């Protein structure tokens, strides 16, 4: 198996050294570089391709959360910090896992295996973007063209995606995170962890529920409701 290229970012030398040693213990990982300065790490990541970043959150200059948000195409992120309170914020940035210091090797290995599975899934994704208005997906043994404007919503179902178009639906091997890069504002919005909806397909809003034109009702995550209302121009 091709080794996964890794970067370690932590302003504390001891914490950085522990993760570096963990990376070296795992045969399918390769330590590409290590940083104690978040700005230097950001410059490196903007100009180099890596597979996994192990990053602390609380750091001078740029914290780990803001660093990830700055990256146009972030790699797999595993946050490592002493503060459990950052867990939700970490996952909201799309992090694959969140480890609390002091990190045990068995917990680190579990996170790495999770990252490896995600990377393999993404590399074998059956969703192919042709241009800004259409994709091809592999479903039922054939490639099917889907116009983005026709998509009502996309639902994550484990390692698969359910893509719903009016009265039709397709199931294909892919991750919702991979579709995040295709189905973006101003046309689409991720209302919660498992659903991306077409904003034009919204019929009504009721509390923390959104109803689509096909009658489907989907719950809105509490931390997404205000943003959704702003996107829709509701004051």
Image (cartoon, rainbow, N blue to C red):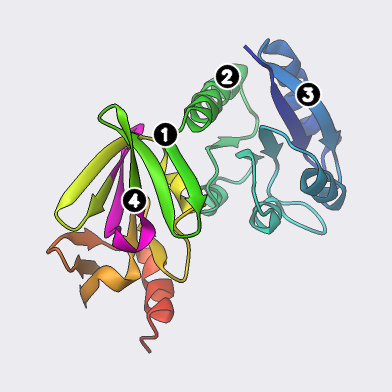
Q: Residue at x 48, y 27 (%)?
A: 124
Residue at disc 4, secondary structure: strand
Separation of residues labelled 3 and 4 (CA atoms): 39 Å
**Between discs 4 and 2, the one toward the N terminus:** 2
Q: Is residue 112 above or below residue 169?
A: above
174 relative position to 42: left or right: left
Q: CA distance from mark 2 to mark 1?
A: 27 Å
Q: Which residue is mark 4?
A: 146
Q: Residues within 10 Å of mark 2 (few under 14, many from 20)?
A: some
How crowded is the residue under tag 4: few (<14 C-alpha within 10 Å), some, or many (20+)?
some
Helix, strand or loop under label 2: helix
Q: Are marks 4 and 2 in contact (CB under 8 Å)?
A: no
Is 181 contained in the magenta span? no
Q: Quadrant of residue 115?
A: top right
- The mark nearer the N terminus, 3 or 4, is 3
State the residue position of label 2.
109
Instruction: Tell me if label 4 and label 1 are in contact, CB under 8 Å.
Output: no
Mark 4 or 1, nearer chain start: 1
Image height check: is 92 above or below 161?
A: below
Which residue in the protein does label 3 denote? Answer: 31
Q: Which mark is residue 126?
A: 1
Number of the front mark, 3 or 4? 4
Relative to the observer, which residue lies in front, 143 or 217? 143
Let me know if residue 155 is in the magenta part.
yes
Q: Position of residue 198 (x, y in %)?
A: 33, 64
């Amino acid at each position: 198996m091709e080794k996964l290229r890794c970067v370690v970012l932590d302003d504390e030398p001891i914490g950085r050294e522990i993760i570096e040693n963990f990376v070296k213990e795992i045969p399918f990982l390769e330590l590409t570089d290590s940083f104690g300065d978040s700005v230097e790490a950001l410059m490196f990541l903007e100009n180099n391709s890596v597979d996994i970043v192990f990053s602390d959150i609380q750091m001078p200059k740029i914290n780990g959360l803001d660093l990830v948000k700055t990256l146009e195409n972030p790699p797999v992120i595993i946050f490592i910090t002493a503060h459990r309170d950052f867990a939700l914020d970490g996952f909201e940035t799309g992090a694959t896992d969140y480890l609390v210091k002091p990190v045990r090797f068995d917990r680190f290995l579990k996170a790495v295996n999770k990252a490896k599975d995600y990377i393999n899934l993404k590399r074998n994704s059956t969703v192919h973007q042709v241009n800004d208005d259409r994709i091809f997906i592999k479903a039922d043994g054939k490639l099917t063209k889907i116009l983005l404007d026709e998509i009502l919503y996309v639902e994550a179902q484990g390692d698969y995606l359910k893509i719903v178009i009016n009265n039709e639906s397709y199931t294909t091997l892919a991750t919702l995170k991979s579709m995040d890069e295709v189905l973006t504002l101003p046309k689409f919005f991720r209302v919660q962890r498992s659903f991306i909806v077409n904003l034009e397909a919204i019929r009504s809003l009721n509390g923390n529920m959104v109803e689509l034109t096909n009658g489907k009702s989907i719950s809105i995550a509490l931390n997404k409701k205000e943003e959704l209302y702003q996107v829709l121009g509701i004051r």
